[in-house]
Amino acid sequence: MANDFWILLAMVIYFAAMLSIGFIYSKRSNSSSKEYFAGGRGVGPWLTALSAEASDMSGWLLMGLPGLAYFTGAADPMWTAIGLALGTYLNWKLVARRLRRYSVVAGDAITIPDFFAKRFHDEKGVISTIAAVIILVFFSVYVGSCFVTVGKLFATLFGFDYHIMMIIGAVVVFVYTVVGGYLSVVMTDFIQGMLMFFALAVVFIGTVASAGGIDNTVEFLRSIPGYLSGTQVAAPKLDPATGQQLVEAGKVVFGAPSDYGIITIISMLAWGLGYFGMPQVLVRFLSIRSVEEVRKSQIIATSWCVISLGCAVCIGLVGRAMMPTELLTSTDAETIFIVLAQTLLPSFMCGVVVSGIFAASMSSSSSYLIIGASAMGENIFRGLLHKKAMDRQVMIVARVTLVVMFLFGIVVAFDQNSSIFQVVSYAWAGLGASFGPLMLCSLYWRRANKAGAVAGMLSGTATVLIWHNLVKPLGGVFAIYELLPAFIISLLFIVVVSLLTAQPNERMLYEFDHYMDDPLPGTLPSGTVLVDEPMEAMEAEVRSGK
C-alpha cells in the first residue's frame, strides 16, 4: 500500500505539471488561430525535434513494441524499429526543410490540409476538406489507442478498474489540450520526450543487470526456438481454452518457429513510409522557427529515435529472460515495461518512470486532438463553410471537435483487450498512404495538380481499408502490410491523373520553381512574409517572362 502511495504521488505531481503548462500557455495560444494551431512559427530546434518524436511514438513505444518483443521474439519489433528509424531520418532529410519553406510561399499555410490546398490553389476547399476528414477519421482511432495505453497502465499498477482509469487519463489530456493549444502540446511533448528517453534507459539498464548480465540473458533467449532470429518468429504454444501460453515444469512452452520471409520483412520496413504522411510530425516542420535550424532538429530527432527504439525492443527481449512465465497472453505482454519498473525501482522512481508511459500517451493523443481540431476549424469550417469566420469562431468549432474526438476515442478504447500495436498500425497505414505520396509529389514534382492530389488521397485511403479488411486475410503475398500497396497505388494515381488532366497554371509553377530560392519569393531572408503584395510582384515577373 505504501509503495502504491509513492508511485501515485509521483504521477500526480507529473499530471499537475502538465496541466500547469497548459494554463501557462493558454493566454498566448488563444491570441490567434496561428498561435493556437502552429505556435506562431516560433518553435526552436530542441522543442521541435523532441515534440515531433514524442507525439509520433505514443504509448506503443513503451508498451506495444516491448510487448511484441516479449511474446514472439526479435524479428517483428526489430524490423519495425529499423523501418521507423530510416523513415524518421528520411522524413527530416527530404521533407522538413522544403515543407517549412514552401508553406510560407503557399499562403503561409499553418496546417497540413491548408498546405495542400494552397500548394494546389484549391480555392473551393475540396483538397483541404478531404484531407481534414481523413485526419479526423484516423486520428480518432489513434486517440483511442492512446487511451487504451492509459487504462492498461493504471489497471496494471494499482489494480484499478480499467475503464474508470482510462476515462480519467483521457480527461487530463483533453483539459490541457483544450486550454493550451499547440504551444502547450509542444512544451509538454518536449518534457515527455525527455521522460520517455529516461524511462527507457533506466529500465533497460536495470533489466539487463537483474537478468544476470548480457551473456546469461543471450544464452537463455537462444534456447527459445527462433526467438533471437531476424528471419524466424518464436511460436508460443497456447491453451485453446484460455488463450494463454502453456507452462510446463515451470517453463513456458514454444513450438517450432515460423519463417519470417522477405514479404514480412518488407512489411515491417514499410512502416517508415508512414512518416511522409504523419500530420503530427509534419506540423512540427511548419512551426519550426527557421529553416536554418532544421539540420540540428534532424540530428536530435534521429538520435532520440534510434536509441529509444533500440531500448524498447531490448526491454521486451530481456524481460522474457527475467520473467519468462509472468505474462502469458499477447495483451498481457504489453505491460512488461510496467511490471519491470515495479520490480526493479524504488516506488517514487517507479512512479516517475511509468509516468513515461502516460507521457507517451498524453503527448500523442494531445497532438492528434489538436491536429484534428485544426482540420475541422481551419479547413472545413473556415475553408469551406464560412470563409470569413473570425479566429474566435474557428477556435470554438475546434474545441467542439476536440470533445467529439475525445468521446469517440473513449468508445474505441473501451475494449481493454485491444492490441495497442494493431490499432496503431491501422491508423498509421491510413495516414501514411493518404498523405505521404502527396507530400513527396507536392515538394518534388512540379507537374502534380489538384486532380492528382484528390485522386492520391482517396485512392490511398480506399486501398488501406480494402486491403486490410478484404485482401490481407487471403494470406501469402497479400498478407503484406497494407501501407506499402496503398502508398504505391496512391503515388500511381497522383502521377497518372495529373498527367491526364490540365497542367498547373503559371502562378503555381512559379511558386514551385522558386520556393527554395534565397530569399523566398515575397519574403525577407529570414522567411517572414512581406505584407506589400508579394503575389502581385511574382505575377508581374511571370508576365514579363523573367
Image (cartoon, rainbow, N blue to C red):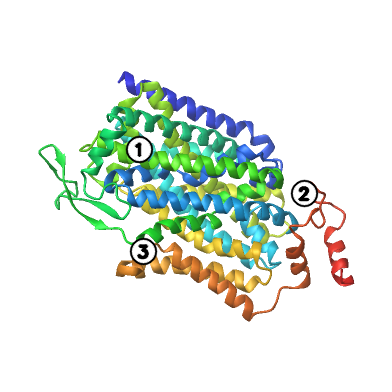
Quadrant showing the C terminus = bottom right
**Disc 1 crowd, CA 10 A, few/some/many (<14, 14-19, 20+):** many
The image quarter in which residue 28 lies: top right
Marker disc for residue 527 = 2
Q: Disc 2 and disc 1: Cα gap in Å?
A: 44 Å
Image-based side of 73 in relation to 312, left or right: left
Marker disc for residue 263 = 3
Q: Disc 3 and disc 1: Cα gap in Å?
A: 26 Å
Residue 213 vertical placement versus 276 (above, below): above
Residue 298 vertical placement versus 463 (above, below): above
Write down the residue under mark 1: 315
Residue 120 vertical placement versus 288 (above, below): below
Q: Can residue 366 be spotted in the picture?
A: no
Residue found 58% across the figure and 31% down from its top: 21
The x, y position of residue 59, in whole percent, is 42, 42
Query: What kind of residue is marked 2?
Result: Gly
**Disc 2 crowd, CA 10 A, few/some/many (<14, 14-19, 20+):** some
Image-based side of 477 in relation to 295, left or right: left
Q: Earlier in the sequence, mark 2 or mark 3?
A: 3
Query: What kind of residue is marked 1?
Result: Ile
Quadrant showing the N terminus = top left
The x, y position of residue 148, in whole percent, is 38, 44
Q: Disc 2 and disc 3: Cα gap in Å?
A: 44 Å
Image-based side of 395 in relation to 478, left or right: right
Of tags 2 and 3, the one toward the viewer is 3
The image quarter in which residue 455 lies: bottom right
Residue that protrudes farthest toward the bottom in the picture: 500
